[in-house]
Image (cartoon, helix red, strand yellow):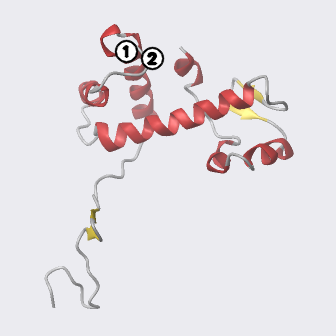
Amino acid sequence: MAENENMHGIDTSERKGKRQVKSSSKHVWNAQKDACLIDCLVRLAQSRQWKADNGQFRVGYLTQLEKWMHEKLHDYSIKGSPHIESRVKLWKRQYHAIQEMLGPNASGFGWNDNDKCITCDAVVFNDWVKSHLRLVSLRNKPFPFLEELRA
């Protein structure tokens, strides 16, 4: 039996095809880590040093966010890429969807400030989600950092 095969002859190595699979790339986020990341993002956005002329963050921003989060949380398992990068992408996608729902071109949506989530009838949401399939999970899902991300 080969070194990377189990008793059934199945390859158990982490290598799948041409791409290396990282077993530790999955990161579990919690409310404390989310709040810390939001604080760090706000700090980054307020810093002239990290803003590019096009309104985006400069190269190396993920490394800076990782450093600040390590300093605040003492959790060195959080990596700029892929952990912070994927969390920021998710929030960006959700933020833009919420802005669209609350914008002038959409009707039937509201914002519940107590629960920090979109409100609407099921029919309205189901019609909207037909053209936004990746965002089906947004209904009744809290998005507590809307105000911070608007700034």
Specify whether residue 116 is in view.
Answer: no
Residue depicted at x 24% and y 85% = 6
Residue depicted at x 39% and y 26% = 36
Q: Kindly identify the amino acid type of the residue bearing the numbered disc 1.
A: Lys
Q: Which label sits on residue 23?
A: none
Q: Secondary structure at mark 2?
A: loop
- Name the quadrant containing residue 106: top right
Left or right placement of residue 53 versus residue 75 in this view: right
* Quadrant (top left, top right, bottom left, bottom right) of the N terminus: bottom left
Please determine whether, in this image, residue 116 is positioned above or below residue 77.
Answer: above
Q: How many labels were placed on the picture?
A: 2
Q: Secondary structure at mark 1?
A: loop
Q: Percent from the top left, x then y, of residue 3?
A: 13, 82
Specify whether residue 37 is in view.
Answer: yes
Q: CA distance from mark 1 to mark 2?
A: 6 Å
Please determine whether, in this image, residue 10 is positioned above or below residue 96.
Answer: below
- Name the quadrant containing residue 121: top right
Proximity of marks 1 and 2: CB atoms separated by less than 8 Å = yes
Q: Which label sits on residue 51?
A: 1
Please determine whether, in this image, residue 64 is positioned above or below residue 6.
Answer: above
Q: Percent from the top left, x then y, of residue 77?
A: 26, 43
Quick one: label 2, few (<14), some, or many (20+) residues within 10 Å? Answer: few
Q: Percent from the top left, x then y, of residue 138?
A: 65, 42
Residue depicted at x 35% and y 42% = 83
Q: Percent from the top left, x then y, of residue 144?
A: 58, 28
For disc 2, the marked residue is 55
Q: Kindly identify the amino acid type of the residue bearing the numbered disc 2.
A: Gly
Left or right placement of residue 122 versus residue 68 in this view: right
Left or right placement of residue 95 versus residue 58 in this view: right
